[in-house]
Image (spheres, grey):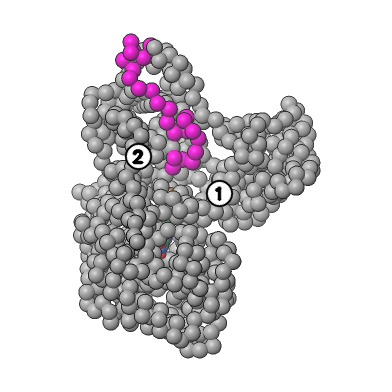
Amino acid sequence: MRDPRYDVLFEPVKIGPLTAKNRFYQVPHCNGGGYRDPTAAAEMRRVKSEGGWGVIFTEQVEIHHSSEITPFIELRIWDEDDMPGLARMADAIHSNGALAGIELAYSGTNGPNLYTREVPMGPMHSPILTFTSDPVQARAMDKEDIRNLRHWHRLAYRRAKRAGYDIMCLYGAHGFGILQHFLSRRTNQRGDEYGGSLENRARLLKELLSDARDEVGDACAVAVRLSLDEMAGEQGFSNAELRDLIGLHAELPDIWDFAHGTWEACSGTSRFKPEGAQEDLIRGIKQLTSKPVVGVGRFTSPDLMVRQIKQGILDFIGAARPSIADPFLPNKIDEGRVEDIRECIGCNICVTGDMTQSLSRCTQNSSFMEEWRKGWHPERMKPAASARKILVVGAGPTGLSAAHRLGLRGYEVALSETSTELGGRVARECRLPGLSAWGRVRDYRQGQIEKMANVAVYRESKLAADDVFDLGFSDVAIATGSTWRRDGVARYHTLPINIAAGMPLFTPDDVMDGKLPAGHVMIYDDDHYYMGSVLAELLIAKGCRVSFVTPSTKIAEWSVNTLEQGQIQRRLLELGVEVRTSHAVVEVGAGSVILACAYTGRLGEISCDGVLLVTARLPDDSLYTDLMAQKAKWADSGIETVKAIGDAQAPAAIAWATYAGHRYAEEFDTPDIGDALPFKREVAGLKN
Ligand SMILES: Cc1cc2nc3c(=O)[nH]c(=O)nc-3n(C[C@H](O)[C@H](O)[C@H](O)COP(=O)(O)O)c2cc1C
Ligand code: SF4
């Protein structure tokens, strides 16, 4: 039963001519699938409808072929070919009573048009401002272009309405939509009635919103998504200007949707942004308009959500990542099951799906984007197929996920763990600077398992092969994790390097075990994700002098995909870390290290007191290999299957580990599918 404290979150709220059934508003978010995987994307939204969201949006939808953001894969509403996919998504959203929103985007100065090869257009002549620095400029739009733009929007409103959408939202946030390019003096230096004063820069916004109302009448609501602050100093569209704009056009849309200026700032990771981080920028805006206001802030705490409403900050709790990590968040609050919420950890692995043009994945919700492809569900599992007893060895993210999901299926499960604490690498890593929210990976699964009578947990139980033979399980999943290498092998070196015995040498495991280097420490990062930079922060805090060496041109290169790279590099530079990019450690001497330039091979030497190698990892798979070597004994012990999963099979990021555990639980008892694909896919139909 719902706690009455949360009743306010379930009040219906009017949006123009429509009413949302509650205040849970899934703001637009892409998923790496978009137009390439339309049914996978639609089914992902259907699950959110089932989970109780009042409003559910598409990702950004490109309205016209003259502006698109290839290589990123979003949706399109260019012509009739796009309609079936869009209608399928609207139907899915409606399936449990949510309002369907569509975010209409004309990318302008942000769209390089790599696919359509049209000449991009924006308010003024400007290079395309996107992640990929394409050698392309947008040309300045003339009056006829602006008339065309209005016409293309009208076509999009008509199609979106016909496809079944209830809310038409114009995209002008994150630097990604042409509305923002017109609103900002940074990207609009026009001399006509569309440039100059704020009123002029807002003219296009006013015209597009009026046209929308004209097209959709009372059938749909009209929304706009704007940046709270462009974060571009004096020149940019600031929070103060935004408030002036709302003063000018307070009642123009049916709902105002606000998101922080850059995508990096808006979807900040938990390492850099706390929950509710946009509150100061949005507070007071609601008082400037009678229309409802939606805002975001990685909201997973119902009490904080209630405060946003009761203090008059927001009318709707906007959520992208919390809805990905737990599509059933509203229903869980409604049913008085707050402790069952699978809270987003703020890692932005979901963003990497978009950035790498692959299907998105989520560390916490392994079924995200597998709802259609594999038929997975975030809350339900198919029932056990037989009375098997499964032993899961290792209670890290993989083992916990496997045990939890097998338990949901109704199997009898034993989860054994060597240490006293559950969580494996997650328990260790969440103690590192900025990563405390990552402990939620363990907390959620441990909390769920503790409620299951059919899952038994054995701590301080280090198992050898003979123990496993004695225990009488039919299936054994080995989820024993991995260990960081101490021989320099990773990407630059695929063979071990020379390391002198006299140099104190450390790995991330040593540091997490409390064995800390001292003095001048060289971190050699050939891993390129978070670990090297997080350990640099830790060592600086412990009083070390830190040199950071990487063969890459950037610190933590892969974190471009989690939107963190700029913040990580800034933080390390501000902390006084001495950064040496484009260099590899080629030899470790007793008191110094030989470096080679990654481009020229030119050698140099740096003296230091210790070296911390953040390189590759090796699976801890000795139990697995022992069991596989004694296959002849399996039948006598009743063992039918043994499988290594997660890092124990091949180390990767935590999202891969939770996925591996979930996958094991879904598939361990399914028949061998031979050469068939283990997922469904959509292949574009051929045309003449
Ligand atoms: C994977 C992902 C994709 C996103 N794609 C879009 C998008 O297509 N359009 C948009 O306006 N915002 C997009 N955003 C930003 C979100 O709508 C939201 O403003 C931001 O993530 C902050 O909300 P949250 O803390 O609830 O995630 C995306 C965010 C994520 C995490
Ligand atoms: S991938 Fe990480 S940030 Fe994204 S929704 Fe999942 S837990 Fe949250």
Give the residue number, with chain letter if any, for mark 1. Answer: 558
Whether 653 is among the magenta residues is yes
Q: Secondary structure at mark 2?
A: loop
- The part of the image, by quadrant, that contains residue 507 is top right
Whether 101 is among the magenta residues is no
Amino acid on which disc 2 is placed:
Leu
Position of the C terminus by quadrant: bottom left
Which stretch appears magenta? Answer: 633-656
Task: Locate residue 559, reporting x and y percent.
Answer: 54, 50
- The part of the image, by quadrant, that contains residue 251 is bottom left
Query: Which one is in front, 93 or 83?
Result: 83
Query: Which one is in front, 222 or 86?
Result: 86
Kindly identify the residue that appears in the image at 29 percent across and 47 percent down.
Answer: 372
Whether residue 34 is visible, yes or no, is: yes
Task: State the mark number for residue 590.
Answer: none
In the image: residue 386, left or right of residue 449: left
Decide: is 231 above or below 389: below
Q: Secondary structure at mark 1?
A: helix
Q: Are marks 2 and 1 in contact (CB under 8 Å)?
A: no
Q: How many discs mark residues in the rendered view? A: 2
Amino acid on which disc 1 is placed:
Trp
Mark 1 nearby-residue class (10 Å; few <14, some 14–19, many ≥20): some
Kindly identify the residue that appears in the image at 26 percent across and 71 percent down.
Answer: 161
Give the residue number, with chain letter if any, for mark 2. Answer: 677
Give the farthest residue toward the front. 688
Kindly identify the residue that appears in the image at 75 percent across and 41 percent down.
Answer: 595
Which marked residue is nearer to the observer: mark 2 or mark 1? 2
- The Cα atoms of the two marked residues, 2 and 1, are separated by 29 Å
Task: Locate residue 596, reporting x and y percent.
Answer: 74, 43
Task: Locate residue 74, reporting x and y percent.
Answer: 40, 60
Kindly identify the residue that appears in the image at 56 percent across and 69 percent down.
Answer: 136
First in sequence: mark 2 or mark 1?
Answer: 1
